[in-house]
Image: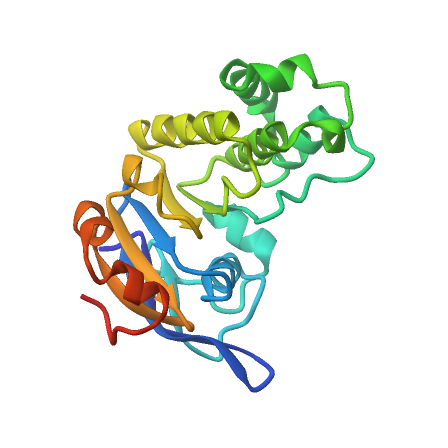
Amino acid sequence: MSLLAVEGLTVKYGPIPALRDVTLGMAEGETLAVVGANGAGKSTLTLAIAGAVRPFAGRITYDGNPLAGLLPEEVTRRGIALVPEGRHIFEGLTVEENLLLGLTARADQASARGALDDIYAAFPILLERRGGLGTRLSGGEQQQLAIARALLSRPRLLILDEPSLGLAPIMVDRVYAILADLRRRGVTLLLIEQNPGRIGEVADRVIVLANGTVQLSGPAAEVLASERLGAAYLGETRGAA
């Protein structure tokens, strides 16, 4: 059974469809990358899974249970965490205060201090900057803060929307090193990227979205080497391969 199953998902903003009949599945421990040009529907897919937008049609199940109708905080408590595009670091809060928000979804608050210590060990820059404002961090440091905050909810499925967007190459290296470590630890990752250049380092499978539909899908090495990849970005193929 898939950990995450999306079946026939259609999402509309008013009369305009952002996603049309999208179907995908993820096994536990798998890394799935969803790539596509700007406006392909990638972020809408993450928001639908996280409960932030309501599907027009279709079904999303997680660990065999439907997610329809759940609020985002309820989805988080089920074991899904989203690192959104733009990171959403809270204005006026310190690094540590931003991190503490990630603990609110945990049922076992007694383990919170130990979890925070573990995060500081994994992200030493956040320990160094814990008393400063989160919005004063560099872009790469803010991305580490957003990932760390999400991990504090102890997700089985971590969704990352454009984690390398706008970062300097050295910080992209750091973010992808973090993703590779999470993959080794068995965290299930749904990775959304506009640029497919780095995803082969961590992805098991790749799906290409264009115009709200799946244009190409398959093992990462095959999709990234496919002559159809460029056409799929433009929505010139039909259906998944």
Would residue 130 appear left or right of 165 to someone viewing this image? right
What residue do we see at 72% from left, 30% from top? 134
Would residue 22 appear left or right of 114 to someone viewing this image? left
Quarter of the image for the C terminus: give it. Answer: bottom left
Residue 138 in the image: above or below residue 156: above
Q: Position of residue 209 (x, y in %)?
A: 37, 64
Residue at the extreme bottom: 15
Q: What's the image's color scheme? A: rainbow
Residue 48 in the image: above or below residue 170: below
Q: Is 90 or 1 nearer to us in this picture?
A: 90
Q: Quadrant of residue 109?
A: top right
Q: Position of residue 216 (x, y in %)?
A: 25, 64
Residue 225 in the image: above or below residue 136: below
Numbered marks: total: 0
Residue 10 in the image: above or below residue 139: below
Residue at the extreme right: 92
What residue do we see at 70% from left, 24% from top? 96
Q: Position of residue 153 (x, y in %)?
A: 53, 37
Q: Is 159 or 139 nearer to us in this picture?
A: 139
Quarter of the image for the N terminus: give it. Answer: bottom left
Q: Is 167 or 241 nearer to us in this picture?
A: 167
What residue do we see at 64% from left, 15% from top? 127
What residue do we see at 45% from left, 40% from top? 155
